[in-house]
Each structure stands twice: as structure tokens, then as C-alpha cells.
Image (cartoon, grey):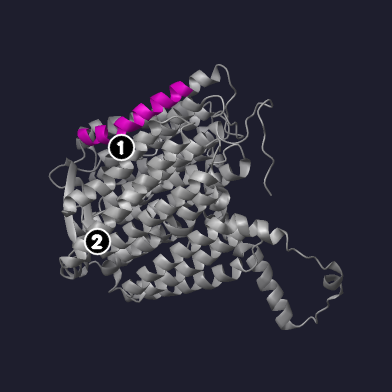
Amino acid sequence: MSTISFIHAYLGLPLLAFFASLLLKKRQESALSILSYSTAGLQLVLVLIYGYFWLRDGSNPTQFKELSVYSSDNYEFFIDFLVDKLTLVFAFLGASLSFLITIYSRYYLHREEGYKRFFNTILFFNLGYTLIIFSGNMETLFIGWEILGVSSFLLIAFYRERMLPVKNALKVFSVYRIGDIGIILAMWLLHHLWHANVTFMEMNANVNMNHHLSNATGIGLLIAFLFYISAAAKSAQLPFSSWLPRAMEGPTPSSAIFYGSMSVHIGAFLMLRTMHFWDQQEVFKYFLIAAGLLTALIASAISRVQSSIKSQIAYASIAQIGLIFVEIAFGWENLALTHILGNAFLRTYQLLISPSIVSHKIREQQYQPEELQGAKTKSTFWSRFQMRIYLLNLKEWNLDLLLYRTIWNPLKRIGRGWKILNFQYVFWVMAIVLIIGVVLRLNEAQLSAQLLHQLPFFFAFWGFLIAVKAFTERDSVRKSLTLIMFNHISISLALSFNEHFDNTHHVWYLSGIVLSWAIGYFLLTRMRRTEWISLDNFYGHIYEYPKTGFVFLLVCLGLSGFPITPSFVGEDLIFSHIHLSQVGLAFFTAFSLVINGLATMRIYTRVFLGPHIKTYHQIAKRSS
């Protein structure tokens, strides 16, 4: 079996199965489940057969360019695939666990209202996971990275009539978007180091790497830290550990396949894939060892005080992944891969039997209030220290509070304090600023060099403020949606002042954005004729408007630059035009794109998910 035919078959199976599952009806439970576990089973057979021939023929890594999507004089966006030991280990892990869990889900979710939706999302997740592990460059990896984030959001919010799963889905998605900043900025810096879209084999070649990093050690160190931010967000390492227990709100099978085995180890995969890029940077290696050990210690302590069995397993898994990061830092690749396989299979098993364990333990509970009330301990320094550590673990070291205070609350203060963008002024201000920008762009030849240098930063910062305002909007849904579109226009305008940025690039970037906004605005306007929609609550309109909700989800993905429109290529394209000296422009552009993604999913969540606003629909009891 050739490598090309193996990759085409392995990638094509989940893609075809996903589209086939969309055509099946809700009541066709057997067809849906058979399609899902047959797909995973065939993938498992393929990876075992190919793995045997790969080992027999010398186990040499193979890389090839699949498709060139866009190319110009100094830029090319292409899909690239790589098969090596790391790919095959993760392919075996994903195929075997997907096969087991889809069989389990067939019976566990029998007659569940969202049965079809669950298997649709699992197949979509399988596609994203497969793209990541077979990716040969950062662009291909980022496509799978985004698919993984969206499918994770949908599975956590599987019980969409309940408030807590919906809120937790948005929390987890927000942490994933923070990780996206690392990927986006790392791609930008790598492009400047290599002056091309670099592949992983080129990145990990020691001769090439030493040549490119010889005069840019600071950039190399920064790229390594950006990789860690993305990996830590995906694998729930410090300071992002608190999201993993919140993700357990989904069904038990999705908790097992996502947060026990496959998705949670993708951060470790990223560090392994880029290991030869940063393994000569001693400062980063020491940091990775310290961060992994600290995560392992804190997560292990927190797991011991959790009252929920899923939370115990989640923090135990975080602790083990922290040790895996330490092993990667020491360069013990084979040990790390063995550890990943063992941890993944163990956590999957624990999560799948957790409902049975809870049912069994409930019958064994014994309470002894008299003994507890009579117990007295001496107040010593050691006892007080133990109690404080216990309370700190019980509060999960205030990791949620840390993220709120350092990231989300400052953004909310900026958005709510930006009074000039209130409803009665916002569109006038937007129009005036954009008209000024277009006039300056048309008269670029008459502007001074200093002004031309400052204008991209100004419009990028302006776009960032617009994105923050869209994210913090509490009233008008259509206003928030329009602000998101204006943000993209501001970013495009900012980059147009840099050389070599022509009208073709505007089309690549803005075509999907404008089309998505127009469809979304039309859907919201039509809904407003009969329904009340706002951003001050969760309205649950998916009950009565399932088709509108599905189309609006696609709109939100298009507005956030998800790889279903040309805008995804456009996002990568605009970063290729940001100079290495324009750090502020790169930062505010990346942050704007991340906040836009959050704002769009926030709109979808509040309008379509949660308990229905009308009282004649069943309302789930609030979770604790």
C-alpha cells in the first residue's frame, strides 16, 4: 500500500462518513451507529496494515504536498501531509478508541433526543483529529485544530436545553481560542524565519533550523513559548487546567473520547511534532519541565478533593499529561508516546465505567455524623497549613478566577467603557473611520513614510476595539454581528497599507466574511418578526428553528474564519504581509480574530441554545 493511497483512504473515510451521516434521518439509529463504528474499524485495519509494511520497509518518514490552494510571488498556501512514527501511533490510538467508544455509544445513547447529532459530531471530530495527526505543515494542522475546537463545543453543549452545559461549552471554547493565538502568531513568525510556509520536516531538520535560528534566537524562543500556549490550552495545562472538568458536562462517551483520550493529548502531539525545533533552546526546556511538574503536582492534589468522579478523572489525566510534557522536554519521545497510550486507554476505561461506579458506590455510602462532630484536632502550624492547602485545592487554586481577572474582565471593561460605540453612534463612527481609511489608501502616494508606518497599527487597534465591543454587547444581536464584520474590514484596511497587498487579497479575506454576515443578518431580521432575540439571556430558539439554527451556526463559523470559506486562507495570507517589526499590528490582528470567534459563538449560544424562553417547553432543572 502506497503512502498516498493510505492517507487518501484514512482521511476520506471520516469525510465521506460525515456527509453520509447528515443525510440519514434521526430515527435511523442503527444506520448511524454502524456507519460510525465501521468508519473507525476500517481506519484501524488500514493503520495496522500500513504500519506493518512501513516497519518492514525501513520506517522512513514520508511527506508530500497534496494541494496548492493559493500561491503568489512570495507566498503559497498548501495542504501538506506527513507520515512518520508519531503519526502512526496517534492514528492507532484514535482509530482503536473511536471504534470502541462508538460501539459503546450505540447502546448508551439509545433513544436519546440528540442521537443523530452526537454521531454527526463524533465523525466531524474524527475528521479534525485525522487532519491534525497527518498534517505536514502548520496550515494543515490549523484546519484540524479549528475543527477539533468546534466539535468540542458542540459535544459539551450536547444537552442544550440545560444552562450549565451551554455555559461550560462557551468557557471551553474561549480557552481554545486563547490557544489559537499561539498558533496564529507562531505561523507568522515562522513565515519570516523561512520566508515561506515551512513544513514540519524542514522545521525539524537540524541543519535548516540552526541556519535560520543562528541570528534569531529570540524569535525561536518566542515561537517555542507560543507553541506551549497552544499546547497548554488544548491539553489543560497550567494556567488553563480548570476547563477540563467543565467539559465533562457532555455525555459520558464524548467525555471519554475527547477529554480522556484523544483531544486532550493533542497538545502533547504539538510539542512532539515541533520538538526538534526547540530542543536546543535550554531556557524553554527548563520552563517546560517546571510547568509540567507544577501542573502534575497541583492537578494531582486537586483531584483528591473532587466530589465528582468525572472531575477526579479529569484532574488525574491533567497530572499525567504534565508528566508527559516533562518527558518530552527531556527528549524521551518513545517514553512519552508509551505514556500517552497508557494514559489514554486508562482514562477512557475509567470514564466509560464511571456511571456504573457511581451507581455502585451510592449503595455503599455510610455517614457517621456523631464521630465527625466529636473529632477534635489540635491547632498547630502543620494542621492549619494542611487545611489551607485543602481549601485551595477545593477552590481549584482559583484558576477560573485568574483567567477572568487577567483576560475576560479587562476586555469587558474596555468594551463597556467605549461609549462612542453605543447604538446611536456606532454606525456613523464606523462609516466615518472607514471612509477616512479608504481615502488615505487611495492617496497613499502623497502620505509621509512615518504616517504610512503608523496607519496599519491604528486601523488594527481600531478593529480590536470594535471586536471587544462586539464581544461585550448585551442588547442588539444584529449590532454585534455587524461590528464583527466591521472588525474584519478594519483589519483588511490596516494590511492594505503594507506593500504587495492588492485587491485579490481583499477578496480572499472578505468574501466569506461579507457573505456570512449578509446571510446571518437576514436570518436574524426574519426571526425578529415573530420572536424576541437579544444577548442578555439564553433563548433556546433551536427548539422551534432547528434549520435556521444550523444555518446560523455555519454563518458564525464563516464570520470567525473557519475553513469553510476563502476567508480562512485570507487570514493566513494577511499575516504573510505583516512585517517582523510590526509586532503591535500582528498582536492586535491575532487578538481581533480570536475575539471575533468568541463573539460569533456567543451570539449563536445565546440566541439558539439554553432553556427555551417560552414556558410551554420543558425546562431542565438547574445544575449545581
Q: What residue sits right under mark 1 in the picture?
A: 567
Amino acid type, label 2: Gly
Q: Is residue 292 above or below residue 378?
A: above
Magenta-highlighted stretch: main secondary structure? helix
Residue 442, how many percent across, how many down?
23, 31
Residue 388, how many percent across, how many down?
69, 72
In 3D space, how far apart are the residues under numbered discs 2 and 1 (Cα atoms)? 37 Å
Q: Is residue 453 above or below residue 441?
A: below
Q: Quadrant of residue 570?
A: top left
Left-right relation of 370 to 232: right
Left-right relation of 496 to 525: left
Residue 612, how many percent across, how many down?
62, 30
Q: Is residue 450 visible?
A: no
Q: Is residue 25 above or below residue 347?
A: above
Residue drawn 54% across and 73% down? 297
Mark sitting earlier along the chain (2/1):
2
Q: What residue sits right under mark 2 in the picture?
A: 51
Q: Is residue 404 magenta?
A: no
Residue drawn 61% across and 54% down? 355
Q: Is residue 355 above or below residue 228?
A: above
Q: Which residues are magenta?
A: 504-523
Amino acid type, label 1: Ser
Between 387 and 580, the one nearer to me in the picture = 387
Between 396 and 459, the one nearer to me in the picture = 396
